[in-house]
Image (spheres, coloured by chain):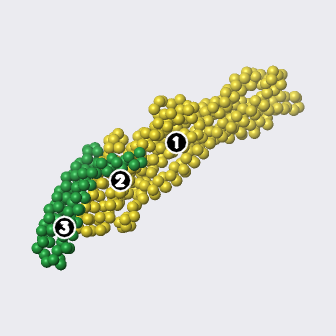
Chain colours: A yellow, B green
């Protein structure tokens, strides 16, 4: 297997030379003894071997081009730091990793904001016969944060799945799948399966990461939401009242006054803006981590189907219809 | 054993077998051609054409076997 990983071009080339020689023998014997079916089989196999060689040359050129594109174009597009000479799957992995770190950091802050809201919802002012809770009706904001948290959780889950798949892709399996496909395609009986493996290696390992690279990771949106939540949480006027003061009506009233009316601070207003930013960030995250990979996977599957058909194309010399 | 070594072994065997088959075909074609000369004129043509087919078959085998690496090399350049 290590041999396939390191020397897939040599292995595929040798397999094609074998298939050329076999086709030459079949063609020569068919011609010598006037066995038309064997002669046609030889011609068919010779053309297929040449097609295999062309596919091999195409793959070598394609992998060089992809590396060139990823080293020149991707760092500009992705806006994330990644090791130099990274492959497209490596760049996607870098994007996913920085996105996950930002998303988890934001979700931690959002949880603390939820705790803060839950605390203030229970805060009451007592007036003898009755009491009021001015911030009791904050359920909608809390629910919006919950929805965003669920969405972020799902997105991080999906991006972890995607990262697992991409680590498989970036581990040099292109050569193994591709060389196995070329070897299998060299033989008449396993031609369609070989074509499928070639198509799968090109589509999953080159096309899929490139489609993902077209979309920028939503790190900036997440960072903006994170700075908004951090500013909210670090505002001293929004910190929880010490427990000893909870029975002190005047202390609670002063606290509520400071939160809403003094010095330009507005607890509910800032909370609303912050929730909006968190919602936008979680939507962008959901798009990047769930929608884009699903679309890319669908396009990749279509490409595999189409390429399999093209690569398994038989040459019309009737022998193929056996 | 490494896959590359196995495939190179198969390639080596085939490059040994193919010229042998080609030589056998050429010798066989010569024999058939000689045999054709001993046949009456109406049957001679059939044997001569069989001999020529065998000779061409032998040439094709040796030509493709010798040219296989070049065929692969030039085919690789088609889409590169």
Element carrying mark 1: helix
Q: CA distance from mark 2 to mark 1?
A: 29 Å
Q: Tell me if A79 is positioned left or right of B30 in this view.
A: right
Tell me whether the residue at label 3 lies in contact with that at label 2, contact meaning CB atoms closer than 8 angstroms.
no
Question: The residue marked by circle 2 belongs to what chain?
Answer: A
Q: Nearer the viewer, residue A249 or B3?
A: B3
Residue A244 seen in render: yes
Observer-side mark, 3 or 2, equals: 3
Residue A144's disc number: none
Question: Which residue appears at 42% of the width and 43% of the height?
Answer: A61
Identified at 79% across, 37% down, the residue is A137
- Circles 2 and 1 in contact, beta carbons < 8 Å: no
Where is mark 3, residue-wise? Answer: B51
Q: Residues within 10 Å of mark 3 (few under 14, many from 20)?
A: many
Residue A261 vs residue A133, the one in the foreground:
A261
Question: For numbered disc 3, what is the local secondary structure?
Answer: helix
Q: Residue at x 77, y 28 (%)?
A: A267
Q: Quadrant of the N terminus of chain A?
A: top left
Q: Position of residue B69 (x, y in %)?
A: 29, 48
Q: Is residue A210 left or right of residue B56?
A: right
Which image quadrant: the C terminus of chain A? bottom left
Q: Residue furthest front?
A: B41
Q: Chain of mark 1?
A: A
Q: Position of residue A36 (x, y in %)?
A: 29, 68
Give the letter of the chain under mark 3: B
Residue named by callout 1:
A210
């Amino acid at each position: 297997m290590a041999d396939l990983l390191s020397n897939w071009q040599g292995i595929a080339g040798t397999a094609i030379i074998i298939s050329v020689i076999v086709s030459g023998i079949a063609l020569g014997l068919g011609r010598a003894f006037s066995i038309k079916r064997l002669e046609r089989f030889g011609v068919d196999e010779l053309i297929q071997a040449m097609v295999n060689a062309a596919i091999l040359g195409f793959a070598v050129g394609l992998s060089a081009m992809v590396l060139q594109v990823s080293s020149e174009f991707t760092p500009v597009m992705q806006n994330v730091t990644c090791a130099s000479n990274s492959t497209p799957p490596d760049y996607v992995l870098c994007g996913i990793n920085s996105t996950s770190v930002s998303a988890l950091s934001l979700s931690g802050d959002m949880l603390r904001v939820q705790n803060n809201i839950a605390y203030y919802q229970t805060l009451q002012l007592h007036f003898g016969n009755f009491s009021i809770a001015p911030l009791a009706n904050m359920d909608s904001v809390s629910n919006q944060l919950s929805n965003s948290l669920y969405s972020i959780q799902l997105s991080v889950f999906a991006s972890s799945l995607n990262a697992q798949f991409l680590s498989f892709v970036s581990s040099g399996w292109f050569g193994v799948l591709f060389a196995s496909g070329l070897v299998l395609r060299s033989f008449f009986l396993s031609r369609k399966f070989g074509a499928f493996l070639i198509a799968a290696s090109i589509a999953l390992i080159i096309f899929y990461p490139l489609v993902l690279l077209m979309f920028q990771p939503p790190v900036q949106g997440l960072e903006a939401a994170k700075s908004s939540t951090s500013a909210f949480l670090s505002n001293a006027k929004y910190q929880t009242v010490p427990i000893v003061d909870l029975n002190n009506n005047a202390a609670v009233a002063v606290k509520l006054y400071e939160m809403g009316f003094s010095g330009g601070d507005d607890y509910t207003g800032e909370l609303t803006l912050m929730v909006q930013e968190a919602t936008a960030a979680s939507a962008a995250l959901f798009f990047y981590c769930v929608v884009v990979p699903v679309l890319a996977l669908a396009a990749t599957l279509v490409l595999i189907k189409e390429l399999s058909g093209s690569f398994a194309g038989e040459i019309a010399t009737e022998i193929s219809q056996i | 054993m490494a896959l590359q070594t196995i495939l190179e072994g198969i390639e080596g065997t085939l490059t040994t077998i193919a010229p042998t088959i080609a030589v056998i075909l050429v010798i066989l074609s010569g024999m058939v051609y000689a045999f054709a000369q001993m046949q009456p004129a109406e049957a001679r043509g059939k044997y001569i054409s069989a001999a020529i087919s065998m000779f061409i078959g032998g040439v094709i085998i040796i030509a493709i076997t010798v040219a296989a690496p070049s065929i692969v090399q030039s085919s690789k350049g088609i889409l590169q």
